[in-house]
Amino acid sequence: MDTSMITAIRAGNPKAFKVFYDLLKQDVYAYAYRFFRSSELAQEAVQDVFMQVWKYRENIDPEQNLKAYVYRIARNSIYNKLKQIAHQGRYASHVFYSQAASHNDLEDWIHCKELREIYEEAINKLPTQRQLIFKLSRIEFLSHEEIADQLCISKNTVKDQIVKSLKFIKHYMYTHAELTTSLVAFVLFVAGF
């Protein structure tokens, strides 16, 4: 692109801007489409990019590569739109789950109580030393070093016992939680909820 076109665009010449737009609109569209995979969003990005170029045309440096300038604006516009989409998705998800949660308070309470009981059962089924180490770590919030000092064992032993405890508890809860979910569904069915 020659400096005369850039100068004309900076001066607000709509014909020069239209020529510039026609030269780059397909490239910007293709660039945006790679991110969005949506024709509508890519076209919206093209409009946003060229609106920004026009809005801030006085700030264009005639010595700067105008195509690189447009791609920088496109990149920033696309990233901002992707962040906005992600935020809207998180908000919609939050609203959906909040609504679902407010309608299932009794079910959640029963399920939570059952899961807590299964969790405590799993801890009680651990070997005595492993159970003690796990409780010191997860209930009394002692560090691995503090537990090792208190029980006169190595930090690696503490770490190993906690890993084994978590693995056992996870497996125990997984196998017993399926039963709990079925029981909750049955209780709610019988109770007429």
Image (tube, rainbow, N blue to C red):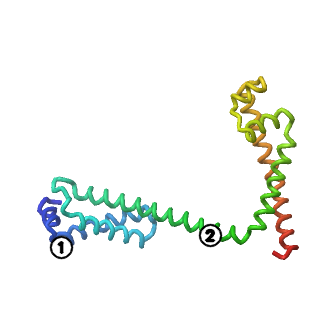
CB atoms of marks 2 and 1 within 8 Å: no
Instruction: Identify the residue shown where x is 68% and y is 70%.
Output: 100
Graded by Cα atoms within 10 Å as few (under 14), some (14 to 19) or many (20 or more), the crowding at tag 1 reads few
Graded by Cα atoms within 10 Å as few (under 14), some (14 to 19) or many (20 or more), the crowding at tag 2 reads few
- The local secondary structure at tag 1 comes to helix
The one nearer the camera, 112 or 182, is 112
Instruction: Identify the residue shown where x is 77% and y is 47%.
Output: 170
* Residue 49 in which image quadrant: bottom left
Q: Amino acid at mark 1?
A: Pro
Horizontal arrangement in the rendering, residue 38 relative to residue 14 (left or right): right
Residue under pointer 1: 14
**Alpha carbon separation for disc pair 2 and 1:** 47 Å
Q: Position of residue 106 (x, y in %)?
A: 78, 67
Q: Which mark is residue 96?
A: 2
Q: State whether residue 150 is above or below residue 19.
A: above
Instruction: Identify the residue shown where x is 20% and y is 59%.
Output: 59
- The local secondary structure at tag 2 comes to helix
Q: Amino acid at mark 2?
A: Phe
